[in-house]
Image (spheres, rainbow, N blue to C red):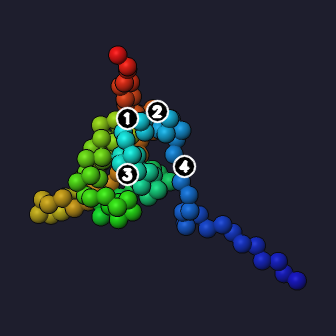
Amino acid sequence: MERIIKIRDLRRKQFFMVDDEFLNGYVKHLGLSATAVYLSLCRHASKDQVAFPSMKTIGAELNVCRETIRRKVKLLEKYHLIQIIRERDGKGRWRSNTYILLDKSEWKRPMEKTCE
């Protein structure tokens, strides 16, 4: 009797990882919406840490409006968690964004809030 071996198909992404330093150090400064946007980008990222979901896709996943996503993406960029590559079409209109998840050595530390 011939035994059939099933090989795991890595093309079907079923999980992703997020660095503990992000969860322990950045979430309290970024807030829930920015954290959710970052997690969505992580979920869509390739092995090369490149993601290109549309704002419409992110909005549908998180049930948030485009303006919220835009503001939170800017915040993620401010802390060097992501780099955004913006592309225009032949007529100069914005076509799409590509998001690169940056290595934590690039991350800008949030300023700690202190009690007075």
Assign a secondary structure to mark 1. Answer: helix
Q: Earlier in the sequence, mark 2 or mark 3?
A: 2
**Residue at 38% across / 24% down in the picture?**
112
Question: Relative to residue 22, is residue 87 drawn left or right?
Answer: left
Q: Position of residue 20 (x, y in %)?
A: 54, 38
Q: Say which of 67 and 107 sits in front.
A: 67
Identified by mark 1, the residue type is: His
C-alpha span from label 3 to label 1 = 14 Å
Helix, strand or loop at mark 2: helix
Q: Nearer the viewer, residue 7 or 19?
A: 19
Answer few, some or many: residues within 10 Å of disc 1's Cα (few below 14, many 20 plus, some between 14 and 19).
some
Q: Amino acid at mark 4?
A: Met
Q: Kindly identify which residue carries mark 4.
A: 17
Disc 2 target residue: 25
Query: Pointer 1 and pointer 2: residues touching (CB < 8 Å)?
Result: yes
Q: Residues within 10 Å of mark 4 (few under 14, many from 20)?
A: few
Q: Which mark is residue 15?
A: none
The residue singled out by tag 1 in the image is: 29
